[in-house]
């Protein structure tokens, strides 16, 4: 079923299927907005990470200042300057490694450098991980989950589709499209390792348990060998079926399907073909009908006749055919196509008889399967090969479908029984909420119209696995348990029909003709279900999902880090009013800045020039205790700092007396003593 962006709810919502409350808030946005937010988060996390490193570098510098005060090892002083002027953990770590390499001959170099290098590396990895995490906050994958927001929610009026009008054919095609989609999804998703094309459902597959030796679902004498039972277990309406109800409004559905080959001996009769008994439109003169007598059909075939196969058709049809006859109970009894004999009538479930005719298909080898049995030799002169024809006109599989409803909050359940009776028990046993009632009503509608074995008879070829091994009129070998293979495949299709039916109920038909015959929700709670289905729309829809907690956590944490980096100096300045230690360490942090070190170098050079030439350059520096120092005077020009090689007059011997940085200024200003620098 196709989707477009108008079918998707855009905005904030809570994903009730998530276990942890923190990840339940979601925000669905367009793919264009997702691109913008992704780019913004990458830049924001990168910027916040750099500011986080500024704070970390400050704290490391502050904690290590006691080691580098007064006289200290060169490597410690260089590390302090590196920390002050660091840009990112990566560049800082690289710089620290260079410092270690230059000072590697020093016996304390490794001890002083290794912790910083390791910590810088870990911080770099952490910043990288934060960037990766920020990308996961916005889900743009085909598996993104969104909520449906359909304006035409409801079911199509189940009119009499036997009348070949445009409306009735449109209704028939609407339901057949559901079956075709379910068959496709089932074949792609079950008994395969890939789940890429399993449909837009929140849960791509639904598991079940199989009992290969179950008891006969009918009277024991009616089954040939052991039965097979498929039990879905309790399917949660949220986690499995894709609804998004609150915990108190969720419901659980259990479906048990038990099937077995049905005895035909004593329940078949051969009658002459005439208008009162034939199952064909125009009976042929002299033709005979092989009738199965399992209870009178609504077609009034006579006696207990349920279904019959023309001998002429069986001998001339080069393809397999299948027919479903079924019965329901309670309010669904009017949907029954026959009244079962006592041996097959079970009130604990809804029964189906599947009549499979291999007709004139030629088996390349005998088949011992009780339903597809073929042992009658038939020599084909054209092929010069002996084929085998079916033993009987039809093979019969009988199935009983049983249901159970449970409340996941109270752990109470109805009894296991037919669909109509168990639905009636919901109100008596579960004491359901209005939303639970609405959910049961919707699911019952889907189960009775789509998600059942009788509906599979609408498409014969697609719903028999045995037909996948047919080439023309030739049937290639089948296993002796082919009927069990068919039942397993049917069950997989029914499970997909359950999901497909829910989806179609929520979306409603797209055909304008069918929209005029839409049965809308009958209560506010049913209408609320129209906005409570989670799906995976797949690629091309143009939507994305944002984990709201992750998004706001990143924004909040990043903002706090940025604010901390902006005001860490201000906080330290305030604390320095009451602490001499904090004042000294804060002053050291300021002086280790590259611009302050440049100021110190220029002032030292000025003193050298004054000492050598007797003239003062007249530079007056400001902002000694600020991040950025300045020079008074708008016309001041600074030249390059001379090196000893370029300026003999500024040799180390001349500079040697200048080994302190304005101790007089420090003493007069009351600041902590300046650290010693040898230039």
Image (spheres, rainbow, N blue to C red):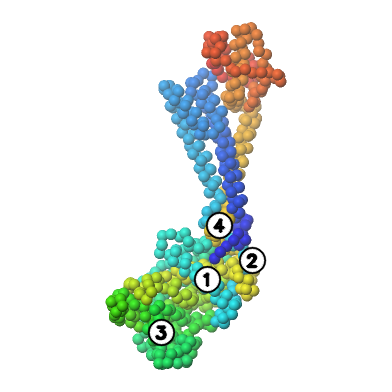
Q: Out of 461 and 395, give the one closest to the viewer.
A: 461
Residue 119 is situated, as x and y percent measured from the top left of the image, at: 48, 34
- Residue that mark 4 sits on: 540
Distance from Cα at disc 3 to Cα at disc 2? 48 Å
Distance from Cα at disc 1 to Cα at disc 3? 29 Å
Q: Quadrant of residue 316?
A: bottom left
- Residue that mark 3 sits on: 313
Disc sitting over residue 1 in the figure: none
Q: In this picture, is 2 found above or below 20?
A: below
Distance from Cα at disc 2 to Cα at disc 4? 21 Å
First reached walking from the N terminus: tag 3 or tag 4: 3
Residue 53 is situated, as x and y percent measured from the top left of the image, at: 55, 35
- Name the residue: 53% across, 11% down: 652
First reached walking from the N terminus: tag 1 or tag 2: 2
- Say what secondary structure mark 3 lies in: helix
- Residue that mark 2 sits on: 151
Residue 344 is situated, as x and y percent measured from the top left of the image, at: 42, 83
- Residue that mark 1 sits on: 177
- Name the residue: 60% across, 54% down: 30
First reached walking from the N terminus: tag 1 or tag 3: 1
Q: Nearer the viewer, mark 1 or mark 2?
A: 1
Taking the view exactly as shown, the residue that stands out farthest to the right is 634
- Say what secondary structure mark 1 lies in: helix
- Say what secondary structure mark 4 lies in: loop
Q: Nearer the viewer, mark 1 or mark 3?
A: 3
First reached walking from the N terminus: tag 3 or tag 2: 2
Q: In this picture, is 611 found above or below 556?
A: above
Crowding around mark 1 (Cα neighbors within 10 Å: few <14, some 14 to 19, many 20+) is some
- Name the residue: 34% across, 72% down: 476
């Amino acid at each position: 079923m196709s989707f477009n962006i108008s079918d998707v709810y855009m905005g904030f919502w809570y994903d009730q299927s998530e276990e942890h409350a923190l990840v339940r808030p979601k925000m669905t946005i367009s793919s264009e907005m997702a691109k913008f937010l992704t780019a913004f988060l990458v830049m924001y996390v990168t910027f916040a990470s750099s500011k986080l490193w500024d704070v970390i570098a400050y704290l490391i510098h502050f904690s290590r200042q006691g080691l580098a005060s007064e006289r200290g090892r060169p490597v410690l002083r260089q590390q302090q300057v590196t920390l002050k002027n660091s840009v990112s953990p990566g560049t800082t770590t690289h710089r620290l490694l260079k410092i270690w390499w230059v000072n590697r001959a020093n016996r304390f170099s490794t001890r002083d450098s290794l912790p910083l290098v390791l910590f810088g590396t870990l911080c770099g990895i952490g910043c990288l991980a934060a960037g990766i995490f920020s990308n996961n906050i916005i889900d743009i994958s085909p598996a993104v989950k969104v909520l449906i927001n359909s304006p035409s929610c409801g079911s199509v009026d189940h009119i009499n589709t036997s009348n070949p009008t445009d409306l009735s054919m449109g209704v028939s095609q609407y339901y057949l499209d559901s079956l075709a989609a379910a068959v496709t999804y089932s074949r792609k998703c079950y008994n395969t390792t890939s789940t890429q094309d399993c449909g837009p459902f929140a849960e791509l597959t639904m598991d079940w348990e199989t009992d290969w030796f179950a008891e006969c679902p009918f009277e024991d004498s009616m089954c040939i060998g052991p039965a097979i039972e498929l039990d879905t277990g309790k399917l949660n309406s949220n986690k499995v079926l894709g609804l998004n109800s609150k915990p108190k409004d969720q419901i659980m559905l259990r479906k048990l399907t038990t099937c077995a080959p049905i005895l035909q001996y004593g329940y078949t009769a051969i009658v002459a073909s005439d208008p009162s008994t034939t199952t064909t439109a125009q009976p042929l003169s002299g033709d005979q009908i092989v009738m199965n007598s399992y209870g009178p059909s609504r077609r009034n075939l006579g006696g207990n006749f349920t279904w019959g196969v023309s001998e002429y058709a069986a001998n001339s049809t080069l393809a397999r055919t299948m027919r479903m006859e079924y019965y329901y109970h309670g309010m669904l009894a009017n949907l029954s196509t026959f009244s079962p004999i006592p041996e097959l009538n079970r009130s604990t479930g809804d029964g189906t008889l599947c009549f499979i005719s291999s007709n004139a298909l030629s088996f390349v080898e005998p088949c011992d399967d009780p339903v597809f049995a073929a042992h009658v030799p038939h020599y084909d002169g054209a092929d010069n090969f002996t084929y085998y024809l079916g033993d009987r006109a039809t093979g019969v599989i009988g199935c009983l479908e049983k249901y159970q409803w449970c409340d996941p909050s109270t752990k109470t359940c109805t009894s296991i029984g037919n669909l109509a009776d168990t639905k009636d028990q919901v109100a008596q046993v579960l004491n359901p909420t209005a939303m639970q009632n609405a959910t049961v009503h919707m699911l019952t509608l889907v189960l009775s119209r789509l998600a059942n074995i009788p509906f599979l008879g609408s498409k014969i070829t697609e719903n028999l696995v045995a037909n996948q091994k047919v080439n023309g009129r030739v049937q290639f070998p089948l296993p002796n348990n082919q009927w069990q293979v068919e039942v397993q495949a049917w069950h997989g299709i029914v499970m997909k029909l359950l999901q497909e039916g829910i989806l179609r109920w929520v979306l409603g038909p797209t055909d304008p003709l069918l929209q005029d015959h839409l049965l809308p929700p009958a209560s506010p709670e049913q209408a609320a279900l129209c906005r409570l289905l989670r799906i995976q729309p797949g690629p091309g829809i143009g939507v994305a999902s944002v984990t709201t907690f992750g998004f706001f956590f990143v924004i909040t944490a990043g903002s706090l880090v940025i604010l901390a980096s902006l005001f860490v100096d201000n906080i330290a300045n305030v604390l320095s009013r009451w602490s001499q230690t904090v004042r000294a360490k804060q002053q050291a942090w300021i002086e280790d800045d590259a611009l302050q070190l440049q100021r110190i170098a220029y002032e030292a050079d000025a003193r050298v020039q004054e000492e050598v030439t007797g003239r003062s350059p007249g530079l007056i520096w400001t902002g000694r205790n600020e991040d950025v120092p300045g020079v008074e005077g708008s016309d001041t020009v600074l030249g390059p700092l001379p090196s000893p090689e370029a300026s003999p007059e500024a040799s180390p011997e001349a500079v040697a007396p200048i080994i302190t940085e304005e101790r007089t200024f420090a003493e007069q200003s009351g600041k902590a003593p300046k650290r010693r620098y040898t230039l």
